[in-house]
Image: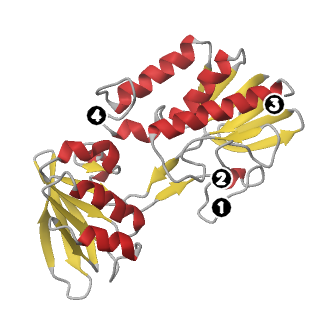
Amino acid sequence: MYDVIVVGGGPAGMTAAIYAQRNGKTALVIEKAGFGGQITHSPKVENIPGFSSISGNEFADQMLDQVLSQGGEIEFETVVSVESEGDKKLVHTEEGSTFEGKTVVLATGVKHRMLGLEGEDELVGEGISFCAVCDGDFYAGKRVCVAGGGNSALQEAILLSEKCSEVILLQDLPEFTGEAKLQEVLFSRQNVTGITNLKINRLLKNGEELSGVEVENRETGEVRAVFCDGLFVAIGLIPENDAFAGLADLNDFGYFDSDEQCLTKTPGIFVAGDCRSKSVRQVTTAAADGAVAALAACRYINGL
């Protein structure tokens, strides 16, 4: 039986494993795809303390090495359910395995909602981005598009407008749905243009690089190209927490309804990272959650 089983191998999950082991506990990290989470989409990251510049994959590899060097174990399986039987937690996977632990940290992360266009996956990190804070500097002085029209898209566009020569907001609905104040701030800027009621049909490339998007007016059917150096997709995040709703309350958007203490309604079950209800989702806040959740798990095991 493990002291701490971590579901998810992103920055939150791996930090939880590191902190658990530093406190003398055994830890298992179960990850279904690849370690690192969303940060692996960023070829160059410059906002992690201690690193002037590092690729997302390199950062993830270093965190994984740290987990393993401290005696942590990893499994590549997909967790489908967790049972709480008092002091024992049972973690079941799609592959048929069952792991026993004294505590569980759910660090399931989120995935970005994609446009569903051909070649989109190959361009993530190579012209398509999701985070202006992370990647905006790479497009300083350049022309970028932002797909979306809600609060997230407007906030991304505001940040980009401070760095880029031109920002074009592409909305598929007849109007922008974000807060009026955000719209007022954004569209008061001379380098920002908003286009509504359009469909993005396909991605345009110059060789292997993104060069723009083909859009279609939903009313007139007019098709035209909008050229840009980068495309920021801000059409929402998708948490995958439904399988654990019996252990931890979810908010209206499907995120774990837990505060900065990372606790749940089930003793011995904790949550951490982007899967939790929060206002800021960055690698640093995910790691902070991982530390908080792991230390809470250690206190639980120690009966404190």
Looking at the picture, which amino acid does disc 1 mark? Asn
Residue extending farthest left? 206
Using the image, tell me which numbered label, if any, was put on residue 256.
2
- Looking at marks 1 and 3 on the same chain, the residue that comes earlier in the sequence is marked by 1
Is label 3 in a helix, a strand or a loop? helix
- Quarter of image, res 29: top right
Front residue of 5/11: it is 11
Residue 217 point in image, percent of width and height = 22, 81
Is label 1 in a helix, a strand or a loop? loop
Residue under the image location 61 percent in, 30 percent down: 291
Residue under the image location 15 percent in, 46 percent down: 209
- Looking at marks 4 and 3 on the same chain, the residue that comes earlier in the sequence is marked by 4
**In the image, is 155 to the left or to the right of 93?**
left
Is label 2 in a helix, a strand or a loop? loop
Using the image, tell me which numbered label, if any, was put on residue 251.
1
- Looking at marks 4 and 1 on the same chain, the residue that comes earlier in the sequence is marked by 4
Q: Are marks 2 and 4 in contact (CB under 8 Å)?
A: no
- Looking at marks 2 and 4 on the same chain, the residue that comes earlier in the sequence is marked by 4
Looking at the picture, which amino acid does disc 2 mark? Phe
What distance separates the C-alpha of mark 1 from that of mark 3? Answer: 25 Å
Q: Are marks 1 and 2 in contact (CB under 8 Å)?
A: yes
The quadrant of the image that shows the C terminus is top right
What distance separates the C-alpha of mark 1 from that of mark 2? Answer: 6 Å
What distance separates the C-alpha of mark 4 from that of mark 3? Answer: 38 Å
What distance separates the C-alpha of mark 2 from that of mark 3? Answer: 20 Å
